[in-house]
Image: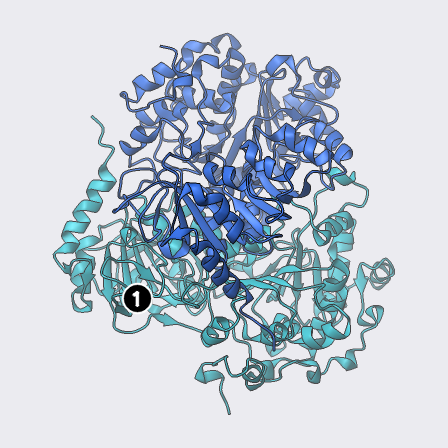
Chain colours: A blue, B cyan
Amino acid sequence: MKNWNAQKTGLAERLADGGRYAAGKTVEVEKLRNFLEAVIRPGDRVCLEGDNQKQADVLADALANVDSAKVHELHMVQSGVVLPEHLDVFDKGIARKLDYSYSGPQAARIARMLFGGKIELGAVHTYLELFARYFIDLTPNVALIAAVSADKDGNLYTGPNTEDTPTVVEATSFKSGLVVAQVAEIVDQLPRVDIPGDQVHFVVEAKKPFFVEPLFTRDPAAITEGQILTAMLAIKGIYAPYGVKRLNHGIGFNTAAIELLLPTYGERLGLKGKVATRFALNPHPALIPAIESGWVEQIHSFGSEVGMEDYIRARPDIYFTGPDGSLRSNRAFCQVAGLYACDMFIGSTLQIDLQGNSSTVTTSRIAGFGGAPNMGSDARGRRHPSEPWLQAGKEADPDGPAPLRRGRKLVVQIGETFGDKNVPLFVEKLDALALAEKLNLELAPVMIYGDDVTHIVTEEGIANLLLCHDEDEREQAIRGVAGYTDVGRGRDAKMVQRLRERGVIRRPEDLKIDPLDADRSLLAARSIKDLVQWSGGLYAPPSKFRNW
Amino acid sequence: MKNWNAQKTGLAERLADGGRYAAGKTVEVEKLRNFLEAVIRPGDRVCLEGDNQKQADVLADALANVDSAKVHELHMVQSGVVLPEHLDVFDKGIARKLDYSYSGPQAARIARMLFGGKIELGAVHTYLELFARYFIDLTPNVALIAAVSADKDGNLYTGPNTEDTPTVVEATSFKSGLVVAQVAEIVDQLPRVDIPGDQVHFVVEAKKPFFVEPLFTRDPAAITEGQILTAMLAIKGIYAPYGVKRLNHGIGFNTAAIELLLPTYGERLGLKGKVATRFALNPHPALIPAIESGWVEQIHSFGSEVGMEDYIRARPDIYFTGPDGSLRSNRAFCQVAGLYACDMFIGSTLQIDLQGNSSTVTTSRIAGFGGAPNMGSDARGRRHPSEPWLQAGKEADPDGPAPLRRGRKLVVQIGETFGDKNVPLFVEKLDALALAEKLNLELAPVMIYGDDVTHIVTEEGIANLLLCHDEDEREQAIRGVAGYTDVGRGRDAKMVQRLRERGVIRRPEDLKIDPLDADRSLLAARSIKDLVQWSGGLYAPPSKFRNW
C-alpha cells in the first residue's frame, strides 16, 4: 500500500534529530553546525534566506561549514545570492544546483563557477516567479530564515524587513518542510507577530542582528545634470501627458533625480496630486522631499531601507506599518502590486539594443533580474482600466475597436546615452547574448524585452515606441535618441526627422525644455544632509553616506 | 503642521467606538448591527469577504441591516459578490461603489443594478489584480472576514478555506484599517494559527460555520462522449507532445473529463509521470483517480472543496496541509503559481469569436473573471525556461534567434462546438461587446484575449494558433474546428485543408484517435459514488451529489 505520509514522517524525523541539539525550539549558535548536519538530508531543496536586503548570515555561515560527507547535493532555491557563503556551499561540495533571482556582489563569481562546472544552474528568475515555483516544483524541504526576534513558542517578529519571509515559510512549512529561524534575540513579548510560531520549528538566537545593506540610498550629490535633464523629460513628456499616478521606480540615479524634481520642477508644472501619488517602492530616501511636500499618498514596499526606520514610523499615513509602528514590507505582494496595480515602471539599464531589448548583464557577470522583468512587462492578465493604461493602448493600436482594445503598461527605460565611464548605453548586440553563447544558456538574460518597452528617455529626447508602425521605425526611433553613440550616429537622419514630426521622437525643445535649465539647483535635496533636514532629522543615513 | 497620523488616530477611534459593544475583542452577534454602525464611517472602503467559496455571511447580513442614515456611501472592494446581501447594501443606500472580481449567482442582478444606476462600477478584476490594488489604491478601511475559530487574543484558524483572508487582512491591518472576523466558535487552543491576533481587532462568535459552497465538484455521470473526445484530443494532441507537467485546469466538464482519463487513456499512452504531475488547482474530486493511480506529485490550491477535507488530510504528500492536518489554501499565492510556475492553462468557455477572444459573459449577466484571465495570459515577465514553454515559443516564432526568443505559455480553450442547450460556442461577435455597448463600459469583459490563446480544442479537432502566420490563417484555423456552427460553415474549405496539411489543424484521425472510442467506459470514475470508492471512502460528497 502506498505511503501518502512520507513528508510528514520525514518532518517528524527531522524534528527528533534536530531536537537532540535544541532546548524546546531553541538551538544555540555553538551547536548550529551539528544541528544542521542532523536536520538536512542529502539532495534537499534548501532556501537559505537570501533576500534582496536581509541575510540569514549566521545560518549561511553554519551551512557553509557542515561536513560535506554528511550534507551534500543540496539544491539551493533562494532569491538572493549575496554573501560569499552562498557560493562557498558549492565550492565545498555541499550544494550542487542553484535556482535564484538576484545576485549583486556575487555576480562575477557565479559566472565563473557556472563556467567551471561548480554550479548546476536551474534558472535565473524574477522574484515573483521563484516564489511561484516554491508552490509548484521548487518547494523547499528546509528553509533557513532570518527575523529580528522570536518568543519561546517560535512566533517571529521580522521588523521592517519582512521581505520574502512569509512566502518562504508558507511554502515550506505547509508542505511539511522544516523552518529554522535565526533571530537577534528571544524575548517574552514580541512587538508584533509576523510569522506564527506553529510554522517555525527551531529558533537560533544569533545575539546580533542579521546582515542587511542599504541598497536603495542614492546620494543626491552624485546626480548629474544629464540625469536631471532626463528626469525633466520624463516628468513633462511622460508623467504629465499620461497622468501616471500609480507607479514603480527603479533604483538608479535617473529615477532618484525624478523623485527629487517632483517638489520643484513638478510643482512648477502644476502636477502635484495629478501624478506620482501611489507607489510600489522601497522606502527610497530620495522620495522624502516629495512626501514632505504632500505629493505622495501611499507607498507599499518590497523591503525596507537602512536608516529610514524612524522616518517611516513617523509617517504611517504614507507607509504600511504594524501596530508596533514599524514598516510592514512584503516582497511578494509588492511585486504583485507592481505587476497589476501600477500603470508605469520606469528604470535605468546598462545596455539597450536596436530592438529595444535591455539588459544589465555584462559578459562576466550574472547578476540576475530581481523584480524588474516582472514590473517591466505588459500585464496581459490585467482587466481594470485606467487613463494612462487606456491611452497607451490606444497609441499602440489606434485603429482597434475600443472595447476590445487592451490597454498597455507604460514601461520606460531611462538613461544617458553615455553612462558610467563613458560606456555607451546603446549597442548593436547585447552582452547578454554573448554570455548566453558562452555559457550555453537556453535564454539570454534579457531584463526587459523590446516588445514590452513603451518609451526610451535619454538627454537627446524621448522615443515613444508605441507610435512606431514597424520594426524599422522602432530601430530609427531608438537610434534617434541614442546621441553620439555608434548606434546614434548610424541613424537615418531623414526618417528620424519624420518620426520627430509625428511626435514619435520628442526633443527637449519640442517639450519646451531648455537643457540649460537642467541644473543641480533644481534638486529638492542636493545631498544626504539635505535629505536628513527634509525629514526633520528622522532619516538616519548609514555612516558611509555621512560626510559631515 | 501636517498630521501624518490620521489613519492610526482613526483606528484608535474605531477601536474605542467598537469597544463599547465588545468584551475584550469579542462582539456578540446580537450587538453586531450597532457595532458596525459604530465602527464604519461613511465613504469607507469596505472588504466584506466575499471569496470564491467562503462567505462572511453573518457579517454580510448585519451590514445589510445597518441604518443607512449612519452608514452610507461605502465603496465595496471584495473579490466575490455572491450573497444577496452583497447587493442589498446597494439597494438600501448603504454602499455606492463596487470593485470586484467574480459574481456567480448575482451576475444578472449586478447587471440590472448597474444599468439602473444603483451601483457605480469601479472595475471588474481578476483576483490577483484586485489583491494588487489592495496595496496601492483600493486599500480597505474595514475588512469583515470569515474564519473557523478564534482564540481570545484574536488569533484565527481559517481551516482549509484560507483563500483570500491573509491577503485582505495584511492590506487592511498594516494600513491602520479595522479587521473584524466572524468565527463559528471561540476556543482556548487553535488547531493552527492562520492569522496572528495582532492583525485582528474584533471577533464575532457566529455559533455556526460560515457559508461555503462546493463549486468544483463535477459529477462524472454528467460527462458526455463529446467531452470525452475533446479530452482525448487534448491529452494526445497537447499534453503529450509538449510534455506539460505543471498546469492549471479550469472547472468545467471538459477538464473534469481529462482528469478522469489520465489513469485510463493517459496510462495507455504511456504518459504517467510525463505529463500533469504538478497542479495549481482547487481540490477537484475528479482528480482523485489520477492521484490514487500515482499520477500526481503536488497540488497547491486557491481554496478548498466541500467534502474533500478527510481525503486531503489523508494525502499530505500531495496537498499543502498544516500541522493540524487540514489543507492550507491561499488564493493569492496559487494565482501567482498559476501565472508564473505553470506551463499551461486549459479551460472551457461560453463564446469564442473569429479572433479567438473568448468570454463567459452573456448580455444580461456580469459574472466577472475570477482567476482565468490571469492564468490564461502569457506571462511576459517570466524568465525561467521549460520544455513546453520553449517549444510553444519556437512554434510562434520559428525564425527568431533562439536565445532572444521568449517562450510562450500554453493557453488552451476547450469545448464542444455546440454547448449546453445547443448554443454554438463560436460566434461572429461576442455578447461581451454588446454588453459593453449597453453599459457603456470602457473595456468589453473579455475573459481571454485571442492573442493569448494558443490552442482551441473541439470534437472536430485542435487548432494550433501558434502556427498561424497571419489573422486570416487564425480565423480559418478557428473556423476549421468550429463544426456545424455558422462560423464553422463559413470556412474557406481549401485554406482549412492547407492548414490541416501544415498541422495547424489536427483532426481526430490525424492523431489516430477514433471518435467511436470516446466512450464513457473510458472514464476512471463514472459517478460520484465511483469517486467515493476511489478515495477509499475518504471523499464525503455533499448530499446534493448523492443519489445512492
The single residue placed furthest to the top in the displayed view is A516
Q: Give the number of marks.
A: 1
Most foreground residue, B396 or B365:
B396
For the residue pair A477 and B280, the one nearer the viewer reads as B280
- Residue B14 visible from this viewpoint: yes
Give the residue at x 55% y 66%.
A6
Residue A99 lies, in percent from the top left, at 61, 44
**Residue A380 left/right relative to A485:** left
Q: Where does the C terminus of chain A fall, quadrant-wise? A: top left
Image quadrant where residue A506 sits:
top right
- For the residue pair B491 and A520, the one nearer the viewer reads as A520
Quadrant where the N terminus of chain A is found in the figure: bottom right
Under tag 1, what secondary structure? strand
User: Is the residue marked by circle 1 packed among few (<14), some (14-19), or many (20+) residues within 10 Å?
Assistant: many
Indicate the quadrant where residue A433 lies. Answer: top right
- In the image, residue B152 sits, relative to residue B530, either above or below, namely above
Q: Position of residue A349 (x, y in %)?
A: 60, 26
Looking at the image, which residue is at 45% across and 32% down?
Answer: A243
Is A342 on the left-hand or right-hand side of B259?
A: left
Instruction: Specify the subunit that label 1 lies on.
Output: B
In the current view of this chain or complex, which residue is farthest to the left? B20
- The percent coordinates of residue B175 (x first, y second) are 31, 43
Residue A414 on image: x %, y %: 56, 24
Q: Residue at x 51, y 11 (%)?
A: A225
Asked if residue B238 is positioned above or below residue B374 in the image, the reply reads below
In the image, residue A199 above or below residue A159: below
Q: Residue placed farthest to the bottom in the image?
A: B548
- Residue at image mark 1: B149
Q: Residue at x 81, y 77 (%)?
A: B514
In front here: B317 or A281?
Answer: B317
One can see residue B126 in this view: no
Three-letter residue code for mark 1: Ser
